[in-house]
Amino acid sequence: MGGVSGVSEAAQQADAHLQAGEYRQSREVALAGLAAAPQDVELLVLAGRAGVELDAEDATEQLRRATELAPDNAGAWHYLGEALAAEGLMDEAGGAFRRAVELDPSDQVALSHLGHTSAATGHQEEAVDLLSQAAQSMRGASTAAISLVDMYRSLGQYEEALAQAQRIAEAEPDDVMAALDVAELSLTLGRIDEAVAAFGRVRELDDTPGLEASPEALAVLEAPAPAREEIEAALKASLAEYRRVHADDRRLASEDILG
């Protein structure tokens, strides 16, 4: 593998394997290229990215090396952040994502990741601000938009959580989890009519067993306590179980939008 053309060809091949999900082949080609050109940034990034997918011990160091050799390479910082986050090193990951965004403000995925690392390190107000910025520019049920609903809910800002959930539901009318968020948050805020309508939409979209409550049961919430409290408790338990069953599928699907 001689000269620059050989290195470039190796990078093209490694990238093609990576895009096809052939991580082992991608890593092997990238490593072979690095044997001839150990300081090639593109090959270091490709080897590191494939290595992260394969849990290779040296993947993060290869990405670190890439940022050292090319400190203004936004992509290298982005992928280093993902590698560090995968290792649970959220403070360092946040620093890498922040640098990626500084170098490339259009990288909304890095901005979203920075919001998540801020949340993970206890900086909730910053996380809300960052996720809000990312959600505004990413379509539909992006992980930023979904996480923003959860962040507002965790902070007790139910009006803001509901408004965000409604935006997702409008953008993704067939997203059952968006309808569920609207139903739950409307219920929390005592907006019975809105909860009934959203709950009905959930049932239209998905008839999976586990959501036993009905719109009629929701309507009874207008009754005096203790009947209202008893029904509300049963409904919340039913919704919680339904969310547990479906939340992982929704979040996995949202990753396709990020990509």
Image (tube, grey):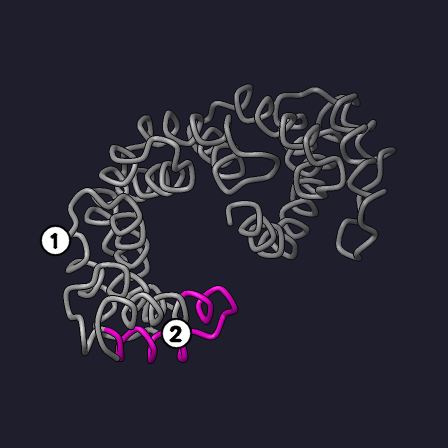
Disc 2 residue type? Ser
User: Residue 26, which numbered label?
Assistant: 2
- Magenta segment, prevailing SS (helix, strand or loop): helix
User: Residue 190, which numbered label?
Assistant: none
| Residue 257 on image: x %, y % | 57, 46
Question: Which of the two residues, 216 or 251, is positioned nearer the viewer here?
Answer: 251
- Which residue is rendered at x = 51% and y = 46% of the image? 258
Question: Which of the two residues, 63 or 165, is positioned nearer the viewer here?
Answer: 63
- The answer to whether 11 is drawn above or below residue 234 in the figure is below
| Residue 190 on image: x %, y % | 67, 21
Question: Which of the two residues, 101 or 222, is positioned nearer the viewer here?
Answer: 101
- Which residue is rendered at x = 31% and y = 28% of the image? 126
Q: Secondary structure at mark 2?
A: helix
Task: Tell which residue pokes out farthest to the left in this image.
Answer: 68
Q: Secondary structure at mark 1?
A: helix
Residue 76 located left or right of residue 196: left
Which mark sits nearer the N-terminus, 1 or 2?
Answer: 2
Disc 1 residue type? Glu
| Residue 145 on image: x %, y % | 52, 34
State yes or no: residue 24 in magenta: yes
- The N terminus - image quarter: bottom left
| Residue 185 on image: x %, y % | 62, 29
State yes or no: residue 20 in magenta: yes
Res 245 quadrant in image? bottom right
